[in-house]
Amino acid sequence: MAATLLHDARRGCLLLLVQVGQPAQCLTHLSQARRSPRTASTSCKHARDAGSLPWESVVGLEIHAQINSVSKLFSSSEVKFAAPPNSTVSFFDASLPGTLPIINRRCVEAAVMTGLALNCNINKKSLFDRKHYFYADLPAGYQITQQRLPIAVNGMLTYRYQVGTSWNHMVTKCVRIKQVQLEQDSGKSLHDDAMHQTLIDLNRAGIGLMEIVMEPDMTCGEEAAAAVRELQLILQALGTSYANMSEGQLRVDANISVHHPGEPYGVRTEVKNINSARFLAKAIDYEIKRQTEILENGGTVLNETMAFDYKLGVTIPMRDKEGKQDYRFIPEPNLPPLILYDAKSLPPNVKPDQVINIDVIKEKLPELPSVTRERLVEQYGILPEHSFTLVNEDGLQEYFVSVVKLSNVDPKKIIGWVIKDLLGHLRQQNLTVKQSMISPSSLSELLILLEKRIISSSTAKQVFQDLCNGEGKTPTEIIKEKNLGLIIDRAQLEEICQKIIDGHKTEVSAVQQGNLKVMHKLIGLVQKTTKGRSDPVLVKTILEEKLLP
């Protein structure tokens, strides 16, 4: 176990740190943060809970994303998840003598596209370096990365997250991005505790990674989790990375420290290899609490690497980090400078498709999540917090759009069913949108029946639950089988209303004396008698005609 942790601690990663501010204020807040990061405001739970305590927390994230590419960064070996061990390894991946790197054009284009989406400046010239360290799953003894001159610099990412339990309380924050760089992944150590041995799988060795470095301004776990989720959505929208954390395609480390306001940052610890945004938030919040308690009790926080035990919800020491690791960076002698072009710098007699053209890549940028949210609000008239949920929940946006197209019902009526009823049910059952028992066509059919007043709203809820049970029947079949159709015979409803009036003299008297709130009870009694098959509006009209002058 110690060997793997040593390797993991030395991987190149992405530093993601967030500054507070509304979108129009991001630049101002970021400028202030550069001068005095500790004065930046925050709405994180820890900051609110510990507002009167003499401690402030600082959180940084190190993330690297696996590039979505057919082959590896410097070899033609296939990139394939869960392939048999050592089945996708070239001579270069195994570092056999005499083998040389050949850069993968797709990986470079993916890094440029990601840099553009994160509002970075693209360097037309970037360099590769060797980062030296020795471990069994790095057979060359060094990793090819971009330490001196990366592919993109000075960007910004804006994201939103929910404060508390209400979707009406959304906070917008900005992230300053220092750089985006290319590097190769290492292999993987497989520990067999029963046989007391460690095996090496080099399938992952040489896979292209994007390391995205961002400035340190975050203060708690919920900020970090939201920032990682937004980055995931951007990478997935671009197609530059699948960013699936459970498959190791997006790996997150967290650097945490606490300090007195106005003083330098405290000693930081690093929590390694967190495999979900939810665990990331929990690990950071626990570590902030742990360090604060140590300092309040007069102790000293050690500069060490930690692991997060998600079962116990605590961080566990792995090893100390008493000295700065000397990786002995040197220029990569086998790779020339990486040269990119735009329309202005394109050499004469060279076609754009013969080189990597920044302007061509920029034209191919798809709609990013922030733009999608704005479009959904404008196109369908839904609330911004609803668009946030649609985009952030995998597959929910496509589901919503399908129901709108199939039903032709007002989207503002559909959104409540999709978010509150459907998504609420799925989360309760721990299911994804793709695993839903209710298809878009079934929900649209149900809403059409409700819109045409064939069923009541309470009946629609009942049918929805039947659909959730997965009986394999359509809403129309369920309504017909259970005789749930709306009672449209006014004479029949008048007779039912009269029986309710005759049996509830006290409530009738209260209504006639001006207490109209009691009318709702009478309507409810009619609904109960009809088992939800009566139209509340029509029932109210009949009752008013019978009781009020």
Image: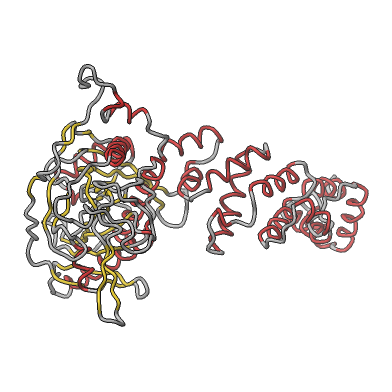
Quick check: 187 left or right of 45? left
Q: Residue at image x 71%, y 60%?
A: 466
Quick check: 491 left or right of 370? right
Q: Position of residue 312 (x, y in %)?
A: 35, 75
Image quadrant occupied by the N terminus = bottom left
Snapshot colouring: secondary structure
Quick check: 303 left or right of 547? left
Does the image show residue 289?
no
Q: Is residue 57 above or below residue 295?
A: above
Q: Position of residue 348 (x, y in %)?
A: 21, 17
Does the image show residue 151?
yes
In front: 532, or 75?
A: 75
Q: Residue at image x 33%, y 38%?
A: 23
In front: 389, or 208?
A: 208
Check the image and name the residue furthest to the front. 98
Quick check: 420 left or right of 306? right
In front: 529, or 225?
A: 225
Q: Residue at image x 45%, y 37%?
A: 372
Image quadrant occupied by the C terminus = top right
Q: Residue at image x 36%, y 46%?
A: 70
Q: How many marks?
A: 0
Q: Position of residue 194 (x, y in %)?
A: 31, 82
In front: 41, or 23?
A: 23
Q: Position of residue 405 (x, y in %)?
A: 63, 37
